[in-house]
Amino acid sequence: MTFRYKLTQTLSVFAISTTLALTACSTNPVSGKKDFSLISKDQEVQMGKKAHQDILKKQRPYNNARLQSYVNSIGQQLASKSHRSNIPYTFTVLDDPSVNAFALPGGYVYVTTGLMAYLNSEGELAGVLGHEIGHVTARHGVQQASAGMAASVLVDLITKKAGGNSKMLNQLGTAMLSGYGRKHELQADRLGAAYLAGVGYSPTNMIDVIGVLKAQEVYASRQRGGRGSSYHGVFASHPSNDKRLQEVVGAA
Protein backbone atom coordinates (compact mmCIF):
# COMPACT_ATOMS: atom_id res chain seq x y z
CA MET A 1 0.00 0.00 0.00
CA THR A 2 1.55 3.33 -1.08
CA PHE A 3 1.87 6.37 1.16
CA ARG A 4 -0.47 8.32 -1.15
CA TYR A 5 -3.12 5.61 -0.86
CA LYS A 6 -2.80 5.50 2.92
CA LEU A 7 -3.09 9.28 3.11
CA THR A 8 -6.16 9.32 0.87
CA GLN A 9 -7.76 6.59 2.97
CA THR A 10 -7.02 8.43 6.21
CA LEU A 11 -8.39 11.72 4.88
CA SER A 12 -11.54 10.00 3.62
CA VAL A 13 -12.22 8.46 7.02
CA PHE A 14 -11.49 11.78 8.73
CA ALA A 15 -13.83 13.65 6.38
CA ILE A 16 -16.71 11.26 7.01
CA SER A 17 -16.16 11.16 10.77
CA THR A 18 -16.02 14.97 10.88
CA THR A 19 -19.22 15.23 8.85
CA LEU A 20 -20.96 12.80 11.21
CA ALA A 21 -19.80 14.76 14.24
CA LEU A 22 -20.97 18.09 12.81
CA THR A 23 -24.33 16.96 11.47
CA ALA A 24 -25.38 14.52 14.20
CA CYS A 25 -25.55 16.63 17.34
CA SER A 26 -28.41 17.17 19.76
CA THR A 27 -28.76 19.02 23.04
CA ASN A 28 -28.34 16.78 26.08
CA PRO A 29 -31.30 17.21 28.48
CA VAL A 30 -29.00 17.05 31.51
CA SER A 31 -25.95 19.08 30.54
CA GLY A 32 -27.58 21.44 28.04
CA LYS A 33 -24.57 20.87 25.80
CA LYS A 34 -24.36 19.35 22.34
CA ASP A 35 -23.88 15.58 22.20
CA PHE A 36 -23.07 13.34 19.27
CA SER A 37 -26.29 11.54 18.40
CA LEU A 38 -27.63 9.83 15.29
CA ILE A 39 -30.96 9.11 16.99
CA SER A 40 -33.71 11.70 17.50
CA LYS A 41 -35.74 11.78 20.69
CA ASP A 42 -38.79 10.40 18.87
CA GLN A 43 -36.69 7.60 17.40
CA GLU A 44 -35.29 6.89 20.86
CA VAL A 45 -38.77 6.33 22.30
CA GLN A 46 -39.76 4.08 19.39
CA MET A 47 -36.49 2.16 19.65
CA GLY A 48 -37.09 1.60 23.36
CA LYS A 49 -40.67 0.49 22.75
CA LYS A 50 -39.56 -2.13 20.23
CA ALA A 51 -36.76 -3.38 22.50
CA HIS A 52 -39.22 -3.55 25.41
CA GLN A 53 -41.50 -5.83 23.39
CA ASP A 54 -38.54 -8.05 22.54
CA ILE A 55 -37.48 -8.28 26.18
CA LEU A 56 -40.95 -9.31 27.31
CA LYS A 57 -40.87 -12.14 24.76
CA LYS A 58 -37.71 -13.50 26.36
CA GLN A 59 -38.14 -12.57 30.03
CA ARG A 60 -41.34 -12.93 32.00
CA PRO A 61 -42.62 -10.06 34.15
CA TYR A 62 -43.16 -11.06 37.78
CA ASN A 63 -46.76 -12.20 38.21
CA ASN A 64 -47.73 -9.89 41.06
CA ALA A 65 -49.77 -6.85 40.07
CA ARG A 66 -49.43 -5.31 43.52
CA LEU A 67 -45.63 -5.41 43.45
CA GLN A 68 -45.52 -4.15 39.87
CA SER A 69 -47.74 -1.22 40.84
CA TYR A 70 -45.61 -0.48 43.91
CA VAL A 71 -42.35 -0.37 41.95
CA ASN A 72 -43.97 1.65 39.18
CA SER A 73 -45.28 4.18 41.71
CA ILE A 74 -41.80 4.78 43.14
CA GLY A 75 -40.28 4.96 39.68
CA GLN A 76 -42.86 7.44 38.41
CA GLN A 77 -42.27 9.72 41.40
CA LEU A 78 -38.54 9.76 40.71
CA ALA A 79 -39.06 10.24 36.97
CA SER A 80 -41.30 13.24 37.65
CA LYS A 81 -38.31 14.98 39.25
CA SER A 82 -35.93 14.05 36.45
CA HIS A 83 -34.54 16.11 33.58
CA ARG A 84 -36.85 14.28 31.19
CA SER A 85 -40.17 14.16 32.97
CA ASN A 86 -41.91 14.78 29.63
CA ILE A 87 -41.35 11.26 28.26
CA PRO A 88 -43.40 8.22 29.30
CA TYR A 89 -41.64 5.85 31.71
CA THR A 90 -42.33 2.15 32.14
CA PHE A 91 -41.04 0.24 35.16
CA THR A 92 -41.11 -3.56 35.09
CA VAL A 93 -40.16 -6.21 37.64
CA LEU A 94 -38.77 -9.25 35.82
CA ASP A 95 -39.17 -12.76 37.22
CA ASP A 96 -35.46 -13.46 37.15
CA PRO A 97 -33.24 -14.76 40.00
CA SER A 98 -30.17 -12.93 38.72
CA VAL A 99 -29.17 -9.71 40.48
CA ASN A 100 -29.72 -7.04 37.87
CA ALA A 101 -31.38 -3.80 36.84
CA PHE A 102 -31.08 -1.95 33.56
CA ALA A 103 -32.67 0.75 31.42
CA LEU A 104 -33.44 1.10 27.74
CA PRO A 105 -33.51 4.34 25.76
CA GLY A 106 -36.90 6.00 25.84
CA GLY A 107 -37.78 5.44 29.50
CA TYR A 108 -37.96 1.67 30.00
CA VAL A 109 -36.52 0.53 33.34
CA TYR A 110 -36.24 -3.03 34.66
CA VAL A 111 -35.37 -4.58 38.00
CA THR A 112 -35.21 -8.32 38.71
CA THR A 113 -36.77 -10.21 41.58
CA GLY A 114 -33.25 -11.49 42.30
CA LEU A 115 -32.04 -7.97 43.00
CA MET A 116 -35.13 -7.00 44.99
CA ALA A 117 -34.62 -9.96 47.31
CA TYR A 118 -31.46 -8.31 48.64
CA LEU A 119 -32.89 -4.84 49.23
CA ASN A 120 -33.66 -3.81 52.80
CA SER A 121 -35.79 -0.73 52.29
CA GLU A 122 -37.88 1.30 49.90
CA GLY A 123 -35.08 3.86 49.84
CA GLU A 124 -32.65 1.27 48.49
CA LEU A 125 -35.11 0.33 45.76
CA ALA A 126 -35.44 4.02 44.94
CA GLY A 127 -31.65 4.20 44.72
CA VAL A 128 -31.58 1.46 42.09
CA LEU A 129 -34.42 3.00 40.08
CA GLY A 130 -32.98 6.51 40.36
CA HIS A 131 -29.64 5.33 39.00
CA GLU A 132 -31.30 3.71 35.98
CA ILE A 133 -33.47 6.78 35.36
CA GLY A 134 -30.22 8.76 35.31
CA HIS A 135 -29.03 6.68 32.36
CA VAL A 136 -32.26 7.49 30.52
CA THR A 137 -32.23 11.22 31.21
CA ALA A 138 -28.58 11.60 30.15
CA ARG A 139 -29.27 9.50 27.02
CA HIS A 140 -26.35 7.17 27.70
CA GLY A 141 -27.90 4.34 25.70
CA VAL A 142 -28.48 6.66 22.75
CA GLN A 143 -24.88 7.83 22.87
CA GLN A 144 -23.65 4.23 22.84
CA ALA A 145 -25.95 3.29 19.98
CA SER A 146 -24.89 6.37 17.98
CA ALA A 147 -21.23 5.54 18.48
CA GLY A 148 -21.85 2.01 17.28
CA MET A 149 -23.73 3.24 14.21
CA ALA A 150 -20.95 5.68 13.34
CA ALA A 151 -18.37 2.94 13.79
CA SER A 152 -20.32 0.74 11.37
CA VAL A 153 -20.32 3.49 8.74
CA LEU A 154 -16.57 3.95 9.04
CA VAL A 155 -15.98 0.20 9.09
CA ASP A 156 -17.88 -0.12 5.81
CA LEU A 157 -15.71 2.59 4.28
CA ILE A 158 -12.46 1.06 5.48
CA THR A 159 -13.53 -2.42 4.40
CA LYS A 160 -14.03 -1.18 0.86
CA LYS A 161 -10.85 0.88 0.72
CA ALA A 162 -8.49 -1.27 2.76
CA GLY A 163 -9.67 -4.72 1.78
CA GLY A 164 -10.94 -5.58 5.26
CA ASN A 165 -7.88 -4.98 7.44
CA SER A 166 -9.17 -6.66 10.61
CA LYS A 167 -6.63 -5.02 12.90
CA MET A 168 -7.65 -1.56 11.71
CA LEU A 169 -11.32 -2.42 12.15
CA ASN A 170 -10.78 -3.63 15.70
CA GLN A 171 -8.84 -0.51 16.61
CA LEU A 172 -11.52 1.70 15.13
CA GLY A 173 -14.30 -0.07 16.98
CA THR A 174 -12.41 0.15 20.26
CA ALA A 175 -11.70 3.85 19.78
CA MET A 176 -15.28 4.70 18.89
CA LEU A 177 -16.79 2.82 21.80
CA SER A 178 -14.28 3.73 24.51
CA GLY A 179 -15.24 6.08 27.30
CA TYR A 180 -18.69 4.56 27.97
CA GLY A 181 -17.98 3.20 31.40
CA ARG A 182 -17.37 4.63 34.80
CA LYS A 183 -17.88 8.24 33.67
CA HIS A 184 -21.47 7.51 32.71
CA GLU A 185 -22.07 5.36 35.77
CA LEU A 186 -20.89 8.17 38.03
CA GLN A 187 -23.14 10.64 36.23
CA ALA A 188 -26.07 8.26 36.71
CA ASP A 189 -25.17 8.09 40.42
CA ARG A 190 -25.22 11.88 40.69
CA LEU A 191 -28.52 12.19 38.85
CA GLY A 192 -30.11 9.34 40.79
CA ALA A 193 -29.08 10.89 44.10
CA ALA A 194 -30.61 14.22 43.05
CA TYR A 195 -33.86 12.54 42.03
CA LEU A 196 -34.00 10.72 45.37
CA ALA A 197 -33.59 14.01 47.22
CA GLY A 198 -36.26 15.62 45.03
CA VAL A 199 -38.82 13.03 46.09
CA GLY A 200 -37.83 13.01 49.76
CA TYR A 201 -35.56 9.97 50.03
CA SER A 202 -32.11 10.32 51.51
CA PRO A 203 -29.44 10.31 48.78
CA THR A 204 -27.34 8.11 51.06
CA ASN A 205 -29.64 5.23 50.11
CA MET A 206 -27.52 5.09 46.97
CA ILE A 207 -24.51 4.17 49.09
CA ASP A 208 -26.46 1.84 51.39
CA VAL A 209 -27.60 -0.36 48.53
CA ILE A 210 -24.03 -0.64 47.28
CA GLY A 211 -22.98 -2.28 50.53
CA VAL A 212 -25.89 -4.72 50.34
CA LEU A 213 -25.15 -5.82 46.80
CA LYS A 214 -21.40 -5.91 47.26
CA ALA A 215 -22.00 -8.33 50.16
CA GLN A 216 -24.20 -10.42 47.86
CA GLU A 217 -21.44 -10.51 45.28
CA VAL A 218 -18.92 -11.74 47.84
CA TYR A 219 -21.35 -14.41 49.05
CA ALA A 220 -22.09 -15.59 45.50
CA SER A 221 -18.39 -15.76 44.78
CA ARG A 222 -17.73 -17.95 47.80
CA GLN A 223 -20.66 -20.23 47.00
CA ARG A 224 -19.43 -20.77 43.47
CA GLY A 225 -15.81 -21.01 44.45
CA GLY A 226 -14.97 -18.19 42.12
CA ARG A 227 -16.20 -14.91 40.86
CA GLY A 228 -19.78 -13.97 41.59
CA SER A 229 -21.96 -12.04 39.20
CA SER A 230 -22.93 -8.51 40.16
CA TYR A 231 -25.26 -5.78 39.05
CA HIS A 232 -23.70 -3.92 36.14
CA GLY A 233 -24.18 -0.35 37.32
CA VAL A 234 -22.97 1.77 40.21
CA PHE A 235 -22.66 -1.29 42.41
CA ALA A 236 -20.27 -3.01 40.03
CA SER A 237 -18.20 0.07 39.24
CA HIS A 238 -17.64 1.59 42.69
CA PRO A 239 -16.62 0.34 46.11
CA SER A 240 -18.87 1.63 48.89
CA ASN A 241 -16.09 3.92 50.15
CA ASP A 242 -15.43 5.45 46.72
CA LYS A 243 -14.50 9.10 47.31
CA ARG A 244 -16.01 10.41 44.08
CA LEU A 245 -19.27 8.56 44.74
CA GLN A 246 -19.40 10.01 48.25
CA GLU A 247 -18.94 13.47 46.76
CA VAL A 248 -21.72 13.22 44.17
CA VAL A 249 -24.15 11.75 46.70
CA GLY A 250 -23.20 14.41 49.24
CA ALA A 251 -23.82 17.15 46.69
CA ALA A 252 -27.42 16.00 46.29
Image (tube, grey):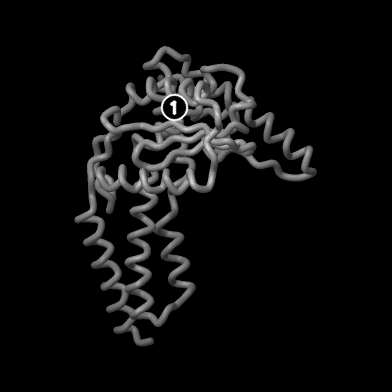
* SS state under label 1: helix
Name the spot of residue 232 as percent of width and height, x first: 55, 40
Residue 52 versus residue 98: which sits nearer the camera? 52
The quadrant of the image that shows the C terminus is top left
Count the marks: how many?
1
Residue at 42%, 59% (x, y): give it. Answer: 175
Q: Which three-letter amino acid code belongs to the residue tagged 1?
A: Gly
Residue at 43%, 62% (x, y): give it. Answer: 173
* Disc 1: which residue: 130
Against 124, residue 105 (above or below) is below
Residue farthest to the bottom?
Answer: 2
Name the spot of residue 47 as percent of width and height, x first: 34, 48
Residue at 68%, 35% (x, y): give it. Answer: 217
Residue farthest to the left?
Answer: 23
Name the spot of residue 167 as percent of width and height, x first: 48, 73
Against 196, residue 112 (above or below) is below
Name the spot of residue 12 as percent of width and height, x first: 26, 73
Residue at 33%, 23% (x, y): give it. Answer: 80
Whether residue 247 appears in this view of the structure is: no
Instruction: Give left or right: position of 161 versus 189.
Output: left
Q: Quadrant of residue 42?
A: top left
Whether residue 133 appears in this view of the structure is: yes
Against 63, residue 10 (above or below) is below
Instruction: Give left or right: position of 21 versus 142.
Output: left
Q: Quadrant of residue 78?
A: top left
Q: Dot 1, crowdedness within 10 Å: few (<14), some or many (≥20)?
A: many
The quadrant of the image that shows the N terminus is bottom left
Residue 44 versus residue 232: which sits nearer the camera? 44
Instruction: Give left or right: position of 168 versus 234.
Output: left
